Amino acid sequence: MKALGRHKLLFSGALLSALFFGLLFWVNYAKIDATLIGVFRELLTLPMLALLPILLFFSLRSWRKTAWSFSSLDVFSVGILLVTIVTLLVASV
């Protein structure tokens, strides 16, 4: 039960970070310039960027502990995190 909680926590963290950066791209694309959105964007962008490699490390470590099983949530966590990181790298160029 404890392991399942760890997998769910890593998956929800990966999903939350992908959702945050997706919303960040959408706000910039739609040119929404609200003060409250700008405050949250400035407060949360750096911690979310720092969280990406940390979540990736722990997701890979957790996936390795499940003997690289493709039926665990860790596969989706690693996939979401890699897609988010690659998207951020491509978008910054």
Image (tube, helix red, strand yellow):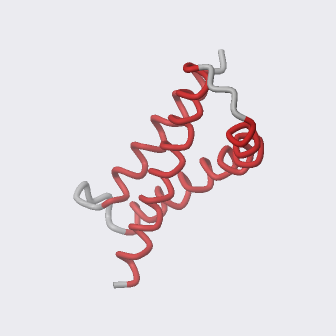
Look at 62% across and 20% down and name the residue there: 31
Q: Is residue 61 left or right of 48 when viewed as pictured?
A: left
In the rendered image, the vertical position of residue 39 relative to residue 4, given as above or below:
above
Q: Is residue 45 left or right of 8 when viewed as pictured?
A: right
Instruction: Give the image quarter of residue 8.
Output: bottom left
Task: Judge by depth and name the residue closer to the eye, 35 or 18.
Answer: 35
Q: Quadrant of the C terminus?
A: top right
Looking at this view, name the residue that lies furthest to the left. Answer: 71
Looking at the rendered structure, the number of numbered marks drawn on it comes to 0
Q: Position of residue 66 (x, y in %)?
A: 33, 67
In the rendered image, the vertical position of residue 86 relative to residue 12, given as above or below:
above
Task: Judge by depth and name the residue closer to the eye, 6 or 19.
Answer: 19
Q: Position of residue 76 (x, y in %)?
A: 34, 50
Q: Position of residue 82 (x, y in %)?
A: 48, 39
Looking at this view, name the residue that lies furthest to the bottom. Answer: 1
Look at 66% across and 20% down and name the residue there: 92
Look at 56% across and 19% down and name the residue there: 29
Q: Quadrant of the N terminus?
A: bottom left
Instruction: Give the image quarter of residue 85.
Output: top right
Q: Position of residue 20 (x, y in %)?
A: 55, 43
Q: Is residue 32 left or right of 11 when viewed as pictured?
A: right
Looking at this view, name the residue that lies furthest to the top. Answer: 93
Look at 71% across and 46% down and name the residue there: 40
